[in-house]
Amino acid sequence: MTVVLRRVNRALLGLAGLLLVVGGGAVLAAALDLPVPSWWPWSGPDDVLLSTSERQHWRDESWWWPVVIAVLGLVVLLALWWLLVQFRRARLAEVLVDTGDGEAAVLRGRALESVLEADATAQDGVARAKVALTGRRGTPRTRIVLLLEPYASPGAALTALSTRALADARTSTGLPALPTEARLRAVKHRARRVA
């Protein structure tokens, strides 16, 4: 998904850039009174982009304004959808597991995430864990958020995470490495009163 999204982004940005360069070049050439081809839409610095008759040509038609509003609404919806897609991070659907016989098995990404969450939550001092797999099927990466109890030591929680949960995940999947980004947060709690 991320590779496709990158390609679509590059294509859209390239197309938008090309249209802006061509349109800007046409306007600049006409404004500077440079020699332009006969088919060029603007011929000189006194020429306007849209004449009065061109602007008012469809104004009296009953279908004109609903079509203009519908097209502009569609453009806005597509732009909002594209913007939301940019912020959505793709999760890994499956991980390739080396079975040792030259073949590879497929492990569901959600299953591995669930096991990592359960292992991390079972650690002392961890109230809750949230795991997301990203990357490629053969080289997955993990993003883990640990919600720590007030008494928990962040260093001990990270050590336990890397030596237990992540080590077990690497061993069971046969992966040589499992790069991980861990974020630690504290559980909200009330301050204790000292009497």
Image: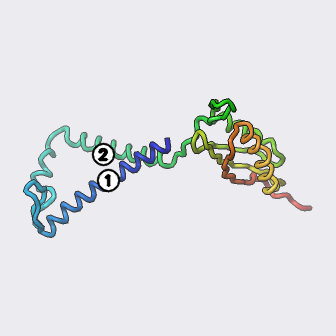
Q: Nearer the viewer, residue 16 or 70?
A: 16
Looking at this view, name the residue that lies furthest to the left: 38
Q: Residue at x 57, y 42 (%)?
A: 136
Mark 2 is on which residue type?
A: Leu
Q: Residue at x 34, y 53 (%)?
A: 14
| Residue bearing mark 1 | 16
Label 2 crowd bin: few (<14), some (14–19), many (20+), radius 10 Å: few
Give the label on residue 156, or none: none
Question: Split into 4 quadrants, where in the image is the C terminus?
Answer: bottom right
Residue 171 x/y as whole percent:
74, 40
| SS of the residue under disc 1 | helix
Calculate the distance from the C-alpha at mark 1 to the C-alpha at mark 2: 17 Å
Mark 1 is on which residue type?
A: Ala
Give the label on residue 72, or none: 2
Indicate left or right for 17 with 165 as reference.
left
Q: Give the colouring mode of the picture.
A: rainbow
Residue 187 x/y as whole percent:
75, 51
Residue 24 x/y as whole percent:
23, 61
Q: Of label 1 and label 2, which has the lower sequence position? A: 1
User: Does the rendering let one see residue 120?
Assistant: no
145 vs 48: above or below? above
Q: Residue at x 70, y 37 (%)?
A: 173
